[in-house]
Image (cartoon, helix red, strand yellow):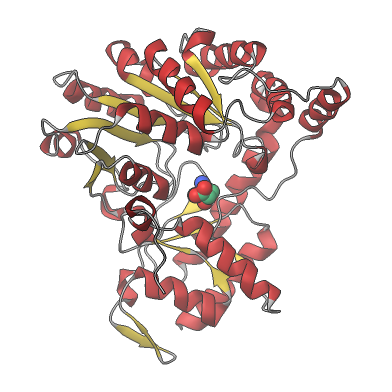
Amino acid sequence: MSHPLSDRINSLPVSETLAMAAKARELRAEGKDIIGLSLGEPDFNTPDFIKDAAIEAIHQNYNSYSPVDGYMDLKEAICVKFKRDNNLIYKPNQVVVSTGAKQSIANVSQVLLNPGDEIILPTPYWVSYSAIATLCEATSIEVPSTIETNFKITPQQLEDVITPKTKMVFFNSPNNPSGIIYTEQEYRAFAAVLEKYPRIFILSDEIYEHINYGEKPFSFAAIENMYDRTITVNGLAKAFAMTGWRIGYIGAPEWIAKACTKMQGQITSGTNCIAQRAAITAVLAPVEKIQYMVDEFKTRRDIMVGLLREIDGFKVNVPEGAFYVFPDVSAFFGKIIDGYQIQNAGDFSMFLLEKANVATVSGEAFGAANCIRLSYAASESQIREAIKRIKMVVN
Ligand code: GLU
């Protein structure tokens, strides 16, 4: 039976990352021993010093609505963080705190995009960018990359897809799902192109900023003539193991911040007050306090990359940040393994779920049809067991 749902929701794809995680949960509830490598979620606990700040906030009776754009002292702390880590000068009235970086991105998209506008998405890209654009009735223009180019696009490719309808470009470095990091030099080359098109805005999603293994990520807004056109998105979920706390934020031109506050004021109001109080402690903490998690992610990355490279048919690049490996598995397309016909990455991902009990996400969801994504935000023993199972079923 079809229900009278709006065209808006009918046009929206399900979030593949969340759908795969839900499927894994379901199978586990049926008693299957599923290893979940689908969701980008640190398996660490939120550090105690952040939890303590939240508990204190509860005892101090933080229970009322907060200002829609976030507490002033949190926004001030975020400005300190932007200066310290990103060499970006923002004033509190340029900062909006939201219920996760996802809401930050949705706010920005809703206040900037009109129906018919185009957004440029270097592929692979995080699943929800294109879905959010669809909600805004904007069109996503994908710029392809492959494992051979280390999942990076060139300035020429960027320029080739710019049209009079282009409104925004989405950059995400360190990248989910490929783990690549654009260097300052590479970002400056994109800026040299964008300089010619002053009406285009740049959304720079820096949520994986602290999870890097060498090259320190560079903030796009730190390029002098890009600052007024760039919205810097960040949040606490990944670096501080605070996915469920839902704290994201932007630094942006004041008029954009103001519009996002207006949007948020009609949809969710200010985000959770306890989480905001704890966020002050988190953003002001020296980065060294979370280094143990980054070190652990690096060890796991090396293990996962090494083990996957031992499997025939897996092409694997070395991610420089975030916590995903994004192998090209196109060598398996057109094959029948154990009676299972594999035509594409979606089939391969389902094959791994059903035959190896390992949950991954198909690259199609990220605009990269030859790949699958495996998260190594899981324990070392789970990673070893998962890859062992994968190796067994594909052989
Ligand atoms: N961003 C994470 C991921 O890509 C969490 C799930 C989501 O919101 O998509 O797995």
- Residue furthest out toward the right: 59
Residue nearer the viewer, 322 or 34: 34
Residue nearer the viewer, 160 or 96: 96
- Residue furthest out toward the bottom: 339
Q: Quick one: quadrant of the N terminus?
A: bottom left
Is residue 283 left or right of 348 when viewed as pictured? right
Is residue 64 left or right of 203 when viewed as pictured? right
The residue located at (39%, 23%) in the rendering is: 231
Image x and y of residue 283, in percent: 64, 22
Q: Is residue 302 above or below residue 338?
A: above
Is residue 32 left or right of 96 when viewed as pictured? right
Image x and y of residue 228, in percent: 32, 13
The residue located at (85%, 24%) in the rendering is: 56
**How many discs appear?**
0
Image x and y of residue 41, in percent: 61, 49
Image x and y of residue 330, in percent: 31, 70
**Residue 253 found in image quarter:** top left
Residue nearer the viewer, 220 or 26: 26
- Residue furthest out toward the front: 4
Q: Is residue 165 above or below residue 314?
A: above
**Residue 118 found in image quarter:** top left
The residue located at (46%, 83%) in the rendering is: 395
Instruction: Determine if residue 270 is in view.
Output: yes
Instruction: Determine if residue 387 is in view.
Output: no
Residue nearer the viewer, 317 or 62: 62
The residue located at (67%, 76%) in the rendering is: 33
